[in-house]
Image: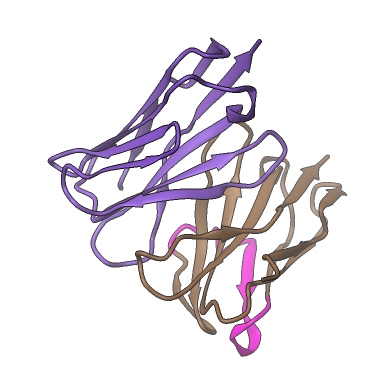
Chain colours: A purple, B brown
Amino acid sequence: GQQVMQIPQYQHVQEGEDFTTYCNSSTTLSNIQWYKQRPGGHPVFLIQLVKSGEVKKQKRLTFQFGEAKKNSSLHITATQTTDVGTYFCAGNTGTASKLTFGTGTRLQVTL
Amino acid sequence: EAGVVQSPRYKIIEKKQPVAFWCNPISGHNTLYWYRQNLGQGPELLIRYENEEAVDDSQLPKDRFSAERLKGVDSTLKIQPAELGDSAVYLCASSLAGYLSPLHFGNGTRLTVT
């Protein structure tokens, strides 16, 4: 079945440093969504990418979708303590609403 | 708009006992999902409903798990009997129809089986 892996599994940065998480799918994706889960919370939708090579920005967050639509990345510039949480990518293959979540990257930010 | 509502928030049961979780999706969301999230892992899909029809239950352990969505709104997920390995957070999510619609998750039910 489809597998979605993320690296790193965990990253600890100091506030102000940059952070990147990478998402890799075993199969070509029709779209990819990114979610953030705060400690003790539930996943919250951040953004969706659909087109090959697409890049989207949300303030300090930059999302990319690979040319082959099998990988994606999330980059946070100048992290803040409010960025703490686990970031999940999730993708669909085809047009069925069967979102497969990645393994997640837990981000810890300290002052 | 009101979010996805789940209850109970926490549940502790002994193994071999039954347990049920309830979910009320966002009004107007035809698609409802049940996910299971183990500690430190991503959510795994158990079952997906389009209105009242279960269109994807391939990951649901049908020997002990059952689900229903009456009238295409609220849904319940049941485990009978529970096993130690069922300890996890059970998340309900809803979305508008279509694979491009983002998921809205409830707060989840944290199940502990002792």
Q: Classify A15 as above or below B101.
A: above
Q: Classify B27 as above or below B81.
A: below
Quarter holding residue A64: top left
In the picture as drawn, the residue positioned furthest to the front comes out as A59
Number of numbered discs visible in the structure rendering: 0
| The N terminus of chain B: image quadrant | bottom right
Q: Residue at x 37, y 72 (%)?
A: B98
Q: Is B69 colored magenta in this rendering?
A: yes
Q: Classify B96 as above or below A79.
A: below
Q: Classify A82 as above or below A19.
A: below
In the picture as drawn, the residue positioned furthest to the left comes out as A68
**Position of residue B70 in the picture relative to residue B94 (left or right):** right
Which residue is at the front of the view, A44 or A25?
A44
Which residue is at the front of the view, B23 or B45?
B23
Quarter holding residue B4: bottom right
- x%, y% of residue B67? 62, 71
Q: Residue at x 47, y 39 (%)?
A: A88
In the picture as drawn, the residue positioned furthest to the bottom comes out as B71
- x%, y% of residue A17? 48, 12
Residues drawn in magenta = B58-74
- x%, y% of residue B66? 63, 69
Q: Residue at x 54, y 84 (%)?
A: B52
**Position of residue A22 in the picture relative to residue B2 (left or right):** left
- x%, y% of residue B37? 60, 44
**Position of residue B68 in the picture relative to residue B56 (left or right):** right
| The C terminus of chain B: image quadrant | top right
Which residue is at the front of the view, A87 or A83?
A83
Q: Is A109 colored magenta in this rendering?
A: no
